[in-house]
Image: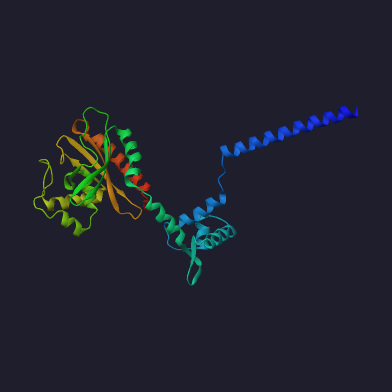
């Protein structure tokens, strides 16, 4: 009887051990499938992001803006200061500003950015939504050079290619880029009078172009109404880097047969969104209003 009882206990123990092992496996699998977000890290990042809009903040201001308890804010600030991600303002120990490690991280990120690589996916997405040609171009002197292109699937479409160079003032991307130049650089580009034209609709008068660029600057987009190709229409918007500087422009181009007032409104919004998405990838953060 005792031996039978001992055997039963051993079996039960082995069953219990197997159950515990399976439970551990399920727990581990669940852990890997559903990783947990760490609240303390989220709060620390929330603190750092406050400084994107304010160069200097007090502990009280952090507490009020994040609606966190004073003790929690104090621990977060002390921890971030200990790692130099925040530093106390000299002479104002309860005032904080961003520290050097954040600059180093930002510089490392910016150094790895590649406009062409980052543009590929955005350009593809924009083209997929309109099935028209989408380009990204940069300014080179008085010309634009096309760096990225994604084509339309329509049989009638824009003929262009990566590496193509065109007079900036005859294109939508070029007019966006020219509108971002300071006065001295713009004067250097518009030194010829008249400017070379590509079609009868090209703007060749420098003074008229300056006036036109004021409108581009105000609207934030430029339109090519047959100025580089009489059979094509195009709309473009600026791409900015982490400093807010205009570094490139994105355009959407289509034959005049598919260009209507209704689609121009739609495609203008689309190219604005695409340029904003690529700007964000390049580190640009739009100012909050």
Q: Position of residue 276 (x, y in %)?
A: 34, 45
Image quarter hosting the N terminus = top right
Q: Position of residue 37 (x, y in %)?
A: 55, 45
**Left or right placement of residue 244 versus residue 2 in this view:** left
Instruction: Give me the residue at 83% from left, 28% from top.
Output: 8
Residue 149 sits in quarter: top left
Q: Nearer the viewer, residue 17 or 100?
A: 17
Residue 51 seen anywhere in this rendered image of the structure: no
Q: How is the image coloured?
A: rainbow
Q: Position of residue 127 (x, y in %)?
A: 30, 35
- Please say if 98 is above or below 164: below
**Left or right placement of residue 214 versus residue 100 in this view:** left
Residue 116 sits in quarter: top left
**Left or right placement of residue 208 versus residue 217 in this view:** left
- Please say if 271 is above or below 185: above
Residue 108 seen anywhere in this rendered image of the structure: yes
Q: Position of residue 88 (x, y in %)?
A: 49, 66
**Left or right placement of residue 195 versus residue 51 in this view:** left
């Amino acid at each position: 009887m005792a031996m039978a009882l001992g055997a039963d206990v051993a079996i039960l123990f082995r069953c219990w051990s197997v159950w515990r092992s399976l439970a551990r496996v399920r727990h581990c699998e669940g852990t890997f499938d559903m990783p947990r977000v760490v609240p303390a890290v989220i709060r620390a990042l929330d603190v750092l992001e406050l400084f994107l809009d304010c160069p200097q903040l007090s502990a009280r201001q952090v507490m009020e803006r994040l609606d966190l308890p004073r003790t929690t804010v104090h621990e977060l600030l002390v921890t971030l200061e200990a790692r130099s991600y925040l530093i106390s303002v000299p002479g104002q120990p309860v005032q904080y500003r961003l520290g050097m490690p954040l600059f180093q991280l930002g510089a490392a990120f910016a150094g790895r950015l590649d406009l062409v690589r980052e543009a590929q996916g955005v350009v593809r997405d924009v083209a997929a939504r309109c099935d028209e040609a989408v380009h990204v171009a940069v300014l080179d002197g008085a010309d634009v050079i096309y760096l990225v292109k994604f084509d339309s699937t329509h049989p009638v479409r824009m003929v262009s290619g990566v590496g193509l160079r065109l007079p900036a003032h005859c294109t939508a991307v070029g007019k966006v880029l020219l509108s971002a130049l300071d006065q001295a650089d713009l004067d250097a580009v518009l030194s010829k009078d008249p400017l070379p034209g590509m079609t009868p609709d090209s703007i060749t008068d420098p003074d008229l172009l300056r006036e036109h660029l004021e409108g581009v600057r105000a609207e934030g987009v430029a339109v090519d109404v047959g100025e580089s190709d009489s059979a094509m229409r195009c709309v473009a918007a600026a791409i900015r880097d982490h400093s807010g500087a205009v570094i490139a422009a994105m355009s959407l181009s289509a034959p005049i047969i598919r260009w209507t007032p209704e689609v121009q409104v739609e495609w203008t919004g689309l190219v604005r969104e695409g340029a904003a998405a690529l700007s964000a990838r390049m580190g640009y953060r739009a100012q909050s209003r």
